[in-house]
Amino acid sequence: MTAPWKPTRREILAVGTAALLTGCTPDSPVPPVPTPAMTAAGRVPLPPDLLLGLSTSAYQIEGSVSADGRGPSIWDTFCNRKGVIVDASSGATACDHYQRWSEDLDLMASLGIQSYRFSVAWTRVLPEGRGAVNQRGLDFYKRLVEGLLDRNISPLVTLYHWDLPQALQDLGGWQVRDSASWFADYASVVFEELVGVRRWLTINEPRVVVHNGHLNGQHAPGIADERAAGRVLHHLSLAHGRAVQAFRSSSASGVIGPCHVLSPCYPADDSPSAVSAAALEDAELNTLYLDPVLKGEYPELTEKLPPRVQRSIESAQRNGDLRIISEPVDLVGINYYTPVVINGRGERQKYFPLTPIDWPMYPGGLTECLLRIHREYGAPLIAVTENGVGGRADEALDDSFRTRFLRDHLLALKTAVDDGARLESYNAWSLMDNFEWAQGYSQRWGLVNVDFKTQHRKPKASARWYADVLGRRSVPLQG
Ligand code: GCO
């Protein structure tokens, strides 16, 4: 944990600009973000080899849920339950990307992006989750990859973004140990077939699969069971390790790694109780997922974790698992949205400015996460695989709050690179408005607006701003 920040007057003056950018005030409990050096034109140059891009995931954009032999996933099932999605919607049509992929690739090319992170829907490739391969589903992704390469956009492929085949859920899903083998077998098929892909991610945000999918039941498969959550946590890590092993023995080449959402946890003050509450929160949110994969050990399990979760993690473990889980990776994918400030009673404090959908915002948290993964975990290479800001359904096309958010986070990323973190790409969330899980279509996360009645796409001001950043490889401090 970072010690609470006690700035001197000189430091406060030195970080004046950063404080403006981040909304961080001089009595902040968090470290300031230094502003990277800028050129005379008021722009901060980006590292020359950093790929800039955008992110999506299959269920959130594709639609066409029964096309070409796709099997049902847990999200198809979950969306049919009453009351679980705020606007009673689903991803059945979403952005109709399955039909409009070519137009969407042209849109990406028109923005000038260099990297596109998308996920493969397991149920398009293996409708039953295992067994017979569905060639038509695979062909969709082959066309997509070819289309990206034709446009000089580098694909970054996520193997699992939450859409487990329903047939596997019926067998126990991630709660059963076999899930690790199912996932490795599915990954092997994709490694062999998607030739041309050189950048891979295994499982998106295991923390959210555990918390939302199995602890509070807000996401598919909608389970709220502490014992289930512990087992799922261990099996997701094991599945990640098995997929990395499968990658090494496949004919695919390139880099592979996990994809974790990180939330830096800050004590609200320097009392020992706040410092220890922040450390416990850090274990629950971050190190419980990072340490097994990147250090080959579980962090000391904390009193914060419900005892049944702890016990079920322990009982799911077998000798040798941690060696598989910590199979060396080539890169670490980081999703960063929001920090946590916590007081001595373990209560989250409102500290930072809020986004339009009330998520705390602190760009310096991105610098901190990147440097932590670089220094503490020795990541050979890091990709920012998601970073972005949600708006309300009626947000304006002139989304200046999003432009500011992206600007401040790109500056925060530059600071981490200047301090030694090795970054391969930055992929903002998201290419276009899409199905936001339990929030349905009530939130907007895209740089491109989607009219869900007509499927018309329209770049927002933030997309034009990002295209300018891409074109000039630098971030303007103003505007
Ligand atoms: C994630 C989610 C994304 C969300 C985004 C905004 O990986 O966190 O996968 O799918 O849409 O985070 O909440």
Image (cartoon, rainbow, N blue to C red):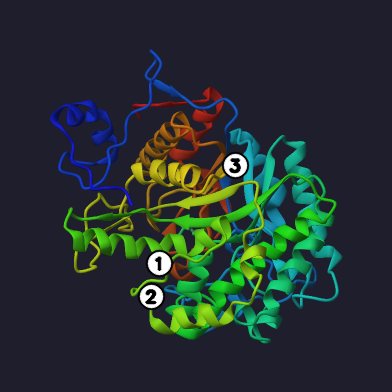
Q: Secondary structure at mark 1?
A: helix
Between marks 3 and 2, how big is the CA–CA gap?
Answer: 30 Å
The residue wearing badge 1 is: 284
Q: Nearer the viewer, residue 251 or 133?
A: 251
Is residue 290 visible to us here? yes
User: Does the CB distance between marks 1 and 2 fall below 8 Å?
Assistant: yes
> In which quadrant of the rendered image does the C terminus lie?
top left
Q: CA distance from mark 1 to mark 2?
A: 7 Å
Residue 325 relative to residue 443: left or right: right
Q: How far across and how far down the image is residue 232, in percent?
A: 56, 76
Q: Residue at x 19, y 45 (%)?
A: 28
| 1 or 2: tag closer to the N-terminus | 1
Q: Earlier in the sequence, mark 3 or mark 1?
A: 1
Inspect the image, locate mark 1, and give the three-letter code of the amino acid beneath it. Answer: Glu
**440 lies above or below 267:** below
Q: Is residue 441 shown above or below 377?
A: below
* SS for callout 2: loop
Please tell me whether residue 215 is drawn above or below residue 115 in the rendered image: below
Determine the residue located farthest toward the front in the rendered image: 319
| Residue identifier under label 2 | 305
